[in-house]
Image (cartoon, rainbow, N blue to C red):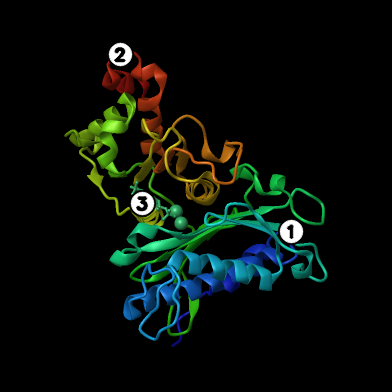
Amino acid sequence: MVRKFTTLYRHIIDEERKIPEATGQLSDLLYDIALACKVISLEVNRAGLIDILGLTGEENVQGEAVKKLDDYSNEILMHMMKLGGHTCAVCSEEEENYIPMEEKYFHQEVLNKYILHFDPLDGSSNIDANISIGTIFSIYKRISKNGIATLEDCLQQGYRQVAAGYVVYGSSTIMVYTAGRGVHGFTLDPSVGEFLLSYENMKIPKKSSTYSINEGNYSKWSKGMQNYISYLKEKDKDSGRPYTARYVGSLVADFHRNLLYGGVFIYPEDDKNKNGKLRLMYEANPLSYIIEQAGGRSSNGKERILDIKPGSLHQRTPLFIGSEEDVLLAEKFLSEEVSKNGVDVKKQIEYKK
Ligand code: AHG
Ligand code: MN
Ligand code: MN
């Protein structure tokens, strides 16, 4: 007997059909992104075999010029957007400015409605170590009515996203996306070359016992931040402490694990990087949209990520994202109220519960 299965494309189309005014353009765009990611996935796997990892401008054993994987991923996605004709602008972590789509690439019958932002290869410091890496993407509708897209089209608040997702290139290739009606995960079956539904309507546990942070930066954090991590490491059976630490240094991989099992990922500001390290448009916004759809929470420690008004494409932000109660607790530790002089942070936390 053949088991029933759902392909990514079927799922996307079925979802879009639920919206009466939908034209199908978003489905096609998501399909183009998935196709680009399949090509990237292939190259990620091939790279290990032919030893081309991270060698920009050098020659491989066949004497061909080879590209760094993040440049390659960027080019594939850009190319696919030109072929597809559904976007009016593309913004990439690897490009300084937004790339407005030239009108010759516009779709014939309907206006190119969408703006795409992506981090073509996240976790790039892990490429050479065969550790999971990924692609993150985020889609908005244009604000301008027609013609060449503007910077204003590209700098919208995260809550205005119409879809977002990521692909993890790991022990298998997985794509997770939301179009505002839940979060769904698909595993690439290499034998048929299709993403097949493997996680329907994903929900993150409300509270976890895992934290993901680069703790090597401890001495650079604020007192509140240091207190929070120290608190998670204390022994207390009733509140499920001490927590477990999990951090590989690829945001997509750390995020994906926390989404499945519960956890809080943190990249805070520190005394050198006042806005943390991660990028609002390419990393924080798409993952925040996904986490909220999955019942989790995301903030910069004070403000909801999706409400932040972006000032520039490469703007950075501190990021606290994951299980709702864990993010809330981090926010309490950071708030002035609990970290002001002489206040016993722990007592305040217990009191505020
Ligand atoms: P990218 O590879 O796209 O530049 O992103 C790297 C990011 C993110 O994936 C990860 O969580 C973080 O950098 C790790 O930073 P640290 O090495 O400072 O921990
Ligand atoms: Mn990244
Ligand atoms: Mn990147």
Q: Which of 322 and 240 is in front in this view?
A: 322
User: Distance of mark 2 from mark 3, alpha carbons?
Assistant: 32 Å
> Which amino acid type is shown beneath numbered disc 2?
Val
Q: Please indicate whether residue 205 sits to the left or right of residue 215 in the image.
A: right
Answer few, some or many: residues within 10 Å of disc 1's Cα (few below 14, many 20 plus, some between 14 and 19): many
Relative vertical location of residue 257 with respect to residue 24 in this rendering, above or below: above
Q: Please indicate whether residue 67 sits to the left or right of residue 97 in the image.
A: left
> Which amino acid type is shown beneath numbered disc 3?
Asn
From the image, tell me which residue sits under label 2: 343
Say whether residue 202 is visible. Answer: no
Q: Do the residues labelled 3 and 1 touch (CB within 8 Å)?
A: no
User: Is ligand 3 within 8 Å of the beta carbon of the residue shown at mark 1?
Assistant: no
From the image, tell me which residue sits under label 3: 258
From the image, tell me which residue sits under label 1: 113
Q: Which SS class for mark 1?
A: loop
Q: Which SS class for mark 2?
A: loop
Mark sitting on residue 137? none
Q: Nearer the viewer, residue 28 or 55?
A: 55
Residue pictured at 36% horizontal, 33% vertical: 270
Q: Position of residue 80 (x, y in %)?
A: 61, 71
Q: Which of 111 and 2 is in front in this view?
A: 111
Residue pictured at 30% horizontal, 44% vertical: 214
> Which amino acid type is shown beneath numbered disc 1?
Lys
Q: Where is residue 293 in the image (x, y as percent from the top left)?
A: 52, 49
User: Distance of mark 3 from mark 1, alpha carbons?
Assistant: 33 Å
Q: Are marks 2 and 1 in contact (CB under 8 Å)?
A: no
